[in-house]
Image (spheres, grey):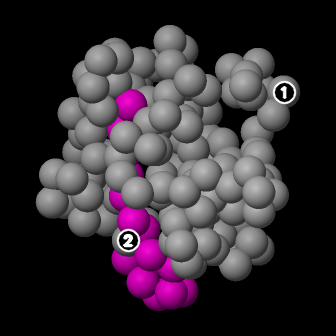
Amino acid sequence: MINVKSLEVREVEYTYESRPKISNMDDVAKIVKPLIADTNKEFFITLYLNTKNGILRQEVISIGSLNSNIVHPREVFRTACKVSASGIIVAHNHPSGDPAPSREDIELTKKLVESGKIIGIDVLDHVIIGYDRNYGFKEAGML
């Protein structure tokens, strides 16, 4: 397991054989939650996907404070272009444990979707990790 909290590893690149496939919000949570659960800071992670939704790379984009994080589309899509991702899924935790999206979460998601459309990289989901449940923008019909 990668200990993101210690900042020893900020990104993971998968080989063809080890590449997990993402089909829903639960798949995202299985990969991301162990890395950022039980932290007192927000971690914003991007999963870069190929055309079959296999993970090419995952990367910590930003580490914020207890209740906020600064994320810019430029940082999210820089690696997406570098690894030729066809789509991305972004995820972050809410240290409060409540995965309900904030106004800022909703605005960021809109910016990411708009930016992705311009460069031809789909934002497939934005998942917020809580203590005992998670929130997916796709599942909620917000994407």
Asked whether 49 or 97 is in front, the reply is 49
Q: How many C-alpha atoms fall within 10 Å of the one at disc 2: few (<14), some, or many (≥20)?
A: some
How many numbered circles does the render carry? 2
Q: Which residues are magenta?
A: 114-129
Q: CA distance from mark 1 to mark 2?
A: 30 Å
Answer whether residue 64 is magenta in the image: no
Could one spot residue 111 in this view of the protein? no
Element at label 2:
helix
Task: Tell me what residue is drawn at x 63 percent, y 58 percent.
Answer: 55
Q: Residue furthest front?
A: 17
Asked whether 52 or 65 is in front, the reply is 52
Answer whether residue 127 is magenta in the image: yes
**Horizontal placement of 25 versus 86: left or right?**
left
Placement of 56 over or under 94, stated as above or below: below
Placement of 38 over or under 116, stated as above or below: above
Placement of 9 over or under 78, stated as above or below: above
